[in-house]
Amino acid sequence: MTKPLKTLLAAICMMASPLIYAEENNQAPQNENRGGIAWGANIATGIDMGGDDMSTLNLHACFGYQNGWFRIAGVGVGIDAMMSNSCRSFPIYAIVQTSFQPTPRLLFGDFRAGIAYNQAPGVPDRANLYLQPGIGIQLAKGSTFSSYLSLSYTYNGMSFYGDQKDTLVHNLHRATVSIGVTF
């Protein structure tokens, strides 16, 4: 089994474990356990940690389900635009934001796993593995919205030969800071 596949399976297991625990320990207060439709958006910047000059400005949106256990559990899409060149990445992923408790907490986990449709000049477009585990902190909460700040590690399997001779961009690793809102 390849390393990216093992990583994806581990991420899926981490996302599924709160669901199993929630089903076995359903002792949340009745008003916190009601669920509903949720959607959200965030804006972020990803700082390249691999020295490839591939830092990004990101805009993402998601849609899914929310209840006492989950701020949101659903699907998301985004645009990650590299700031120093004309490369683009379009991630499509499953998203789970949870505090692993039956009631919302100040800190929560933010997990995203899927594929990124990557575009680079002179290279055929490709779909690669996309992972983004992170932690978030709730900033404000109203009756219909919740805002947050998160810090994540972002992995994108994008690989191509760079602009300069004998350079290779091989897998993007970024530290990502985002500010977002869910409704």
Image: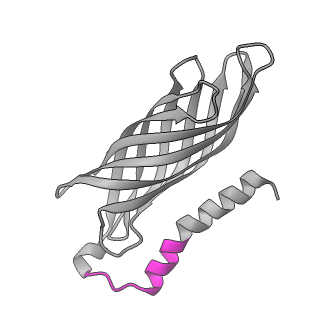
Quadrant in the picture for residue 119? top right
Q: Is residue 27 magenta?
A: yes
> Of residues 134 and 29, which is closer to you in this image?
134
Residue 143 x, y percent position in the rendering: 17, 58
> Seen from this angle, which residue lies furthest left?
143
Residue 161 x, y percent position in the rendering: 76, 22
> Seen from this angle, which residue lies furthest top?
164
Residue 159 x, y percent position in the rendering: 73, 31
Q: For the point 49% across and 32% down, which residue is it?
A: 79
Residue 109 vertical position relative to residue 18 in the rendered view, above or below: above
Residue 105 vertical position relative to residue 2 in the rendered view, above or below: below
Quarter the N terminus occupies: bottom right
Residue 62 x, y percent position in the rendering: 42, 47
* Residue 156 left/right relative to 82: right
Q: For the point 61% across and 63% down, which residue is it?
A: 12
Which segment is the magenta one? Answer: 17-29
Task: Confirm whether residue 72 shows in the render.
Answer: no
Quadrant in the picture for residue 177? top left
Q: For the point 57% across and 66% down, which residue is it?
A: 14
